[in-house]
Image: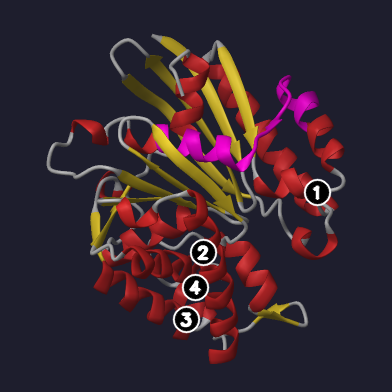
Amino acid sequence: MTRVAGIDCGTNSIRLLVADCDPATGELVELDRRMTIVRLGQGVDKTGRLAPEALERTFAACREYAAVIEELGAQRVRFVATSASRDAENRDDFVRGVVEILGVEPEVISGDQEAEFSFTGATRELTAHEHLQRPFLVVDIGGGSTEFVVGDDHVRAARSVDVGCVRMTERHLVVDGVVTDPPSEKQIAAVRADIEAALDLASETVPLAEARTLVGLAGSVTTIAGIALGLPEYRSADIHHSRISYGQVREITERMLTATHDERAAIPVMHPGRVDVIGAGALVLLAIMERTGASEVVVSEHDILDGIAWSVAGATV
C-alpha cells in the first residue's frame, strides 16, 4: 500500500482524497475525502481572469488540505487543475499560491488527460460488474467543462467540451449580475442550444451511440441522484453506484428549472454552492441521456480524484 493524496481543483469546487492504494490488487482504501465550493471560475468566462476573491477562497481550502495531508502522512501528492485555471490569463498567480501552500505545482492538464483520469476512477470497480454492458460512456459534468470518455477496460476515445453547470449559468441564466429565478423558456433554450452544439462536437471524436452503460460523475449528477433517492441528507454510500432512470432525471430537471432559489436550497442533499447552478447541470445530463438514448445513468462517487490517486500510486492511467 502507498499512501497518496490527490487534489482536483475545478471551476466550481476543489476536492481532496487521501488514500492507501495497492496497484497490484486494485484496492483503494479511502482515509479522507472532502470537497469545498470555491467558485475558482467566478466570472472567468467573461473576464478571462481568475478573480482575487476566488483565488483567496481556493487558497484557504488549500491551507486546510495541507494540514490534512500532513496529519495523515501522505507520501506523494498530486494537484490537478482543470478548466478555469487552464483558460485564465493570470493562472501564474494561481500556480504560485498553490506551490507556497502545498509545496507541489498544480498540473494544468488537458481536457483529454482529465477525461482519462475520470474514466479510470469511475470504472476501475465497475469492470467487475458482469451485468453492466460495455463499452462504458463516462460523463464528468463539471463547472466549466464536461468530459466524455468511451472505453471498456481502457479508454478508446475522449473529448472535453466547454459546457458545465457554472459556465452555462453565467453565460445564459444571469441578468445584471443576478441568477434569474426561475429562468425563462428563452434562457433555457439558449442553454440547450449550447449543450447540443457541444454534443455535436463531442460526437466527432467519441462514439456516443456505441455506449451500452452511461456512467455519470461529479456534483450535478450526484445531487440529482440524491434527490431521486429521496435522501434526508447527502449520503455518499447510498448515491455511489445508484441507477437513476431517464424519467427521474427529466422530472428533476424540470423541477430544478421551475423552483425558486429557496425551494432548491431547502432540498436536503443540496450543497449551498450548487443551488444556483444545479438547473444547468441537470440540463447537461438530460441532453446527454436524450442524445445517447440511455434509459438510466449509473452514478459514481469515484471519479477524477480516484484516477489521480491511482496515477500517484503508480497504477497505469
Tell me if label 3 and label 4 are in contact, CB under 8 Å.
yes
Query: Between disc 1 and disc 4, whose residue precedes?
Result: 1
Q: CA distance from mark 3 to mark 4?
A: 5 Å
Q: Residues within 10 Å of mark 3 (few under 14, many from 20)?
A: many
Residue 100 drawn in magenta: yes
Q: Is residue 57 left or right of residue 89?
A: left
Query: Between disc 1 and disc 3, whose residue precedes?
Result: 1
Q: Is residue 315 left or right of residue 103?
A: left
Residue at the image point whose x is 77% and y is 58% from the top:
44
Secondary structure, mark 2, is helix
Q: CA distance from mark 4 to mark 2?
A: 21 Å
Say which residue label 1 marks. 88
Q: Residue furthest left?
A: 131
Query: Between disc 4 and disc 2, whose residue precedes?
Result: 2
Residue 301 visible, this angle: yes
Residue at the image point whose x is 71% and y is 79% from the top:
178
| Type of amino acid at the residue the image marks with label 3 | Leu
Residue at the image point whose x is 35% and y is 65% from the top:
289
Say which residue label 2 marks. 200
| Type of amino acid at the residue the image marks with label 4 | Gly
Residue 84, percent from left and from top: 71, 49
Q: Nearer the viewer, residue 110 or 95?
A: 110
Q: CA distance from mark 1 to mark 4?
A: 25 Å
Residue 313, percent from left and from top: 47, 14
Q: Residues within 10 Å of mark 2 (few under 14, many from 20)?
A: few
Q: Residue furthest bottom?
A: 185
Say which residue label 3 marks. 257
| Type of amino acid at the residue the image marks with label 2 | Asp
Q: Which residues are magenta?
A: 98-120
Q: Nearer the viewer, residue 113 or 236?
A: 113
